Amino acid sequence: MVTKTTIKPLTLIAFENNWCAQCYTERPVVKNIQQKFAADLDVHLVNADQNPTLTEKYGIYSAPSLVLLKNGEVVEEVSRFVDEQQLTTIISYYR
């Protein structure tokens, strides 16, 4: 049986660290956003310390940092904590 894979137009990469207090606060925001935009958004939580190649690729120097891609291209980068309303606004803009 062949199943159809849905490619979502938006991807959110959330860079975090285990020792980062703001990252613990950001994680539930990202998970809520993942549920809210499930039809349009792929979400990846990435430990920045354990993924140096990916952090270098996106120029990540602090955590939490968020990178939003649309059709594979970076459209927004945020290198600070953002609340759910702010993140909703950012994602809604690019939908």
Image (cartoon, rainbow, N blue to C red):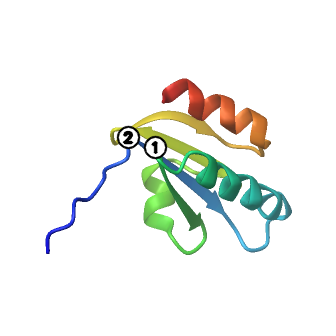
Residue 24's x, y, as percent? 80, 65
Rendered position, 77 above or below 31: above
Give the residue type that dot 2 points to: Pro
Circle 1 — which element?
Answer: loop
Frontmost of labels 2 and 1 is: 1
Q: Which residue is drawn at 70% across and 68% down?
A: 17
What count of labels does the image hold?
2
Assign the N terminus to one quadrant of the image. Answer: bottom left
Q: In this view, does 2 lie above or below 63?
A: below
Counting from the top left corner in percent of width and height, residue 84 is at 76, 42
- The residue that label 2 is drawn on is 9
Q: Is residue 54 above or below residue 85?
A: below
**Residue sitting farthest toward the front:** 1
* Disc 2, SS: loop
Point 61% across, 47% down: residue: 66
Tag 1 or tag 2, which sits nearer the N-term? 2
94 left or right of 8? Answer: right
Return the residue found at the far top.
93
Residue at point 80%, 42% (across, down): 83
Provide residue 20's location: percent of width, then percent of height.
Answer: 80, 65
Q: Is residue 3 left or right of residue 90?
A: left
Q: Nearer the viewer, residue 4 or 13?
A: 4
Tell me, for residue 81, which label it has, or none: none
User: Which is more toward the observer, 8 or 74?
Assistant: 8
Residue underneath mark 1 = 40
Q: Which residue lies at the image location 76% right of the left edge and 60% below the top edge? A: 28
Asked if 43 appears above or below 91 in the picture, the reply is: below
Name the amino acid type tagged 1: Asp
Using a 10 Å C-alpha cutoff, classify the residue at mark 2 as few (fewer than 14 neighbours), some (14 to 19) or many (20 or more): some
Q: Label 1 near label 2: C-beta < 8 Å?
A: yes
Compute the Cα span from label 2 to label 1.
6 Å
Dot 1 crowding, Cα within 10 Å, few <14, some 14–19, many 20+: some
